[in-house]
Image (cartoon, rainbow, N blue to C red):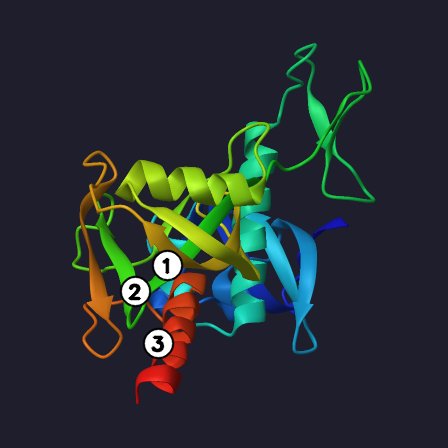
Amino acid sequence: MDRIIEKLDRGWWIVSHEQKLWLPGGELPYGDAENFDLAGQQALRIGEWQGDPVWLIQLHRHHEMGSVRQVLDLDVGLFQLAGRGVQLAEFFRSHKYCGYCGHAMHRSKTEWAMLCNHCRERYYPQIAPCIIVAIRRDDSILLAQHTRHRNGVHTVLAGFVEVGETLEQAVAREVMEESSIKVKNLRYVTSQPWPFPMSLMTAFMADYDSGEIVIDQKELLEANWYRYDNLPLLPPPGTVARRLIEDTVAMCRAEYE
């Protein structure tokens, strides 16, 4: 429910604008509203963390606005709530008017939705399903450096699921498009909400089947097989990519040591 925040309201504060997050001192604000000059703002309670409410406030602060990536090292549950807040703020911002009739919309009081009083249309946040897959060949794992990550980080392959496609088909297609190889023995591992901007990562492990690496240069800077005990710079802990890599390394160690 929406309500106006009072000075002594306490909790975690997700202050978001245009997919950015307010991070004073580089941290997610926690404490009394008056300490962060948030009294009088309209807020929406979006969850609870360790007994304290988590509040969403749609507000642009001129300083210290950053990316949700900066709080990746938070506990998983709190990071997911921060991601939920940023995604909801963007959803509300981008759905002020009905796409069918053009009239103004308002928030539902019972669910994450925007409602149109004129034509009665109802909109929900759109979540884009993605696949991410660790591919193993004997004692090595396929790692790639993406064009959008020019920081030396090597990670596993990933991509969006297309219309009319199963998750398994998406894995086969993305791997073929980006690296020109075929995989087999696909196994589902886990999933992770991924607010960049509004995705759900579905994680898999697979074995190499056939083919030689030929990269899609629009997507990758390079890709190669890396032995489990000689890996390049990896994604940060807390990401599903890092978990897939660590799980693959553990399997290799069990067989080759």
Q: At x 53% / y 70%, what residue is drawn?
A: 76
Residue 247: x and y in percent read 43, 74
Q: Say above or below: 110 vs 36.
A: above
Query: Is 15 positioned to the left or the right of 222 in the image?
Result: right
Q: In this view of the protein, can residue 48 be seen by the observer? A: yes
Tell me the quarter of the picture where residue 97 sits: top right
Q: At x 33% / y 68%, what residue is drawn?
A: 236
Query: What residue would you read off at disc 3?
Result: 249
Q: At x 70% / y 77%, what residue is drawn?
A: 51
Residue type at the position of mark 3: Val
Q: Answer whether labels 3 and 2 touch (C-beta < 8 Å).
A: yes
Marked residue nearer the N-terminal end (1 or 3): 1
Residue type at the position of mark 2: Ile
**CA–CA distance in space, label 1 to label 3:** 11 Å
Query: Is 229 positioned to the left or the right of 174 in the image?
Result: left
**CA–CA distance in space, label 2 to label 1:** 6 Å
Query: What residue would you read off at disc 2?
Result: 141
Residue 186: x and y in percent read 51, 56
Q: Nearer the viewer, residue 236 or 254?
A: 254
Q: Identify the secondary structure beneath mark 2.
A: strand
Residue type at the position of mark 1: Ile
Q: At x 20% / y 41%, what residue is drawn?
A: 214
Marked residue nearer the N-terminal end (2 or 1): 1
| Quadrant assignment for the C terminus | bottom left
In the rendered structure, find residue 181 and report the number of the disc placed on it. none
Q: Say above or below: 25 vs 89.
A: below
